[in-house]
Amino acid sequence: GAKAAGGGCHQWYEEHGADRARQRLTMAADLRRATEEGELSLVYQGEVDLVTGRVEGVEALMRWTSRTRGPVSPAEFIPVAEETGLIGELGAWALDRALGEVTAHNRVTGAGLRAWVNVSPRQFAASKDRADLVTLVVDLLAAYDAPASWLGIEVTESALADDARAVPMLRALRELGVGVAIDDFGTGYSSLSRLHDYPVTLLKIDQSFVRELGGHGAAGPRAAGVVEAVVALGRSLGADVIAEGVEDEQRYRALRSLGCDLAQGYLFGRPGAFADAVRPVEVPGPVLPGMVGARLPGPR
Ligand code: C2E
Ligand code: MG
Ligand code: MG
Ligand code: MG
């Protein structure tokens, strides 16, 4: 973004000027074709219980491999989809696809996994040619004859803080039994009083804190303090706490000793095929006696 770039005028114009606008328009046109020509796909990453190593759920992440551009990062195409309104179509497709895949898996294995799907704030706004998110989810659950416990919605903390309309819709989804996660938690400046209004079942600690956790100097202890505080907050909200971006054993151990419930990251595997994401992982290191008992019971 402009804030992060912090460059001079030239850089500003590159990001915000006519060239940039033109690039976004051509990308939007390509993206529109991508949905029709099947260039979009979903990859999955497991959400691993820090103590047992069991995969409790999967996150669906969208991928676009363009015929002309090659692979395009969601960090690039999701904002374009949001600005052009295409996100409604893309988001509905992702919900359908992820629920279909987890339903097929759960029917065969009896695992009862939850598939988490990222949702943009724009998807909370209904339009004349699109049902609102709650109606869409209700229809999809009926179409797959799937319990609501097989689906979860991830919304970033900043989206929630910006958009008051999201809260009642998430509450309705929560009441159905759909999971509600606050993504990138710790970066969005929610006030503590607002937090108690959010119908949250999972807090996702942002990767920036997880990265700092292993750091030397002052950053490590500071990040540990943040994790501890979020874990305590999760307990008080009746929500599980998951750490994103866990890449090594050192951080895994740190998170486990800080009382975090779940973890997600390259340590267990890159986002990929559904079947790979749900494979149980070997928990690093011994589970110390009393560790399981020491975990406070939380809803799952
Ligand atoms: P997110 O939901 O916070 O997803 C986490 C990102 O971290 C993903 O990037 C994932 O591939 C990456 N990641 C996972 N483990 C590790 C790790 O150990 N280390 C590091 N460095 N990264 C890890 P990805 O797939 O590029 O997605 C980026 C963002 O794009 C997502 O952030 C989400 O906000 C958005 N996004 C992805 N798919 C969708 C979608 O279907 N709909 C919407 N609205 N947004 C999506
Ligand atoms: Mg997410
Ligand atoms: Mg995140
Ligand atoms: Mg993120």
Image (tube, rainbow, N blue to C red):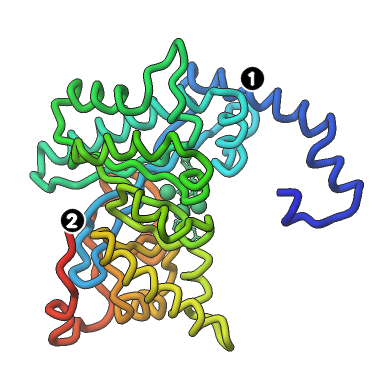
SS at badge 2 = loop
Q: Is residue 159 depicted above or below 52 in this figure? A: above
Q: Residue at x 30, y 22 (%)?
A: 135
Crowding near the residue tagged with mark 1, few <14, some 14–19, many ≥20 C-alpha atoms within 10 Å? few
Query: Which image quadrant is residue 110 in?
Result: top left
Q: Position of residue 297 (x, y in %)?
A: 15, 68
Residue 238 or residue 77, whichever sits in front? 238
Residue positioned most to the front = 193
Separation (CA) of disc 1 from disc 2: 41 Å
Q: Using residue 275 as the reference point, say whether residue 32 is left or right of it.
A: right
Q: Position of residue 264 (x, y in %)?
A: 36, 60
Crowding near the residue tagged with mark 2, few <14, some 14–19, many ≥20 C-alpha atoms within 10 Å? few
Question: Which label sits on residue 107?
Answer: none
Residue 244 or residue 64, whichever sits in front? 244
Q: Is residue 234 depicted above or below 73 in this figure? A: below
List the residue tagged with mark 1: 29
**Among numbered discs 1 and 2, the one appearing first in the sequence:** 1
SS at badge 1 = helix
Q: Is residue 116 depicted above or below 39 in this figure? A: below
Q: Residue at x 14, y 26 (%)?
A: 145
Q: In this rendering, which labeled residue sits more in front, label 1 or label 2? A: 2
Query: Which image quadrant is residue 285 in?
Result: bottom left
Residue 203 or residue 147, whichever sits in front? 203
Q: Position of residue 71 (x, y in %)?
A: 57, 38
The amino acid type of the residue labelled 1 equals Ala
Q: Residue at x 59, y 38 (%)?
A: 72
Q: Residue at x 53, y 66 (%)?
A: 208
Residue positioned most to the right = 9
List the residue tagged with mark 2: 300
Q: Using residue 114 as the reference point, say whether residue 241 is left or right of it.
A: right
Q: Position of residue 43 (x, y in %)?
A: 39, 42
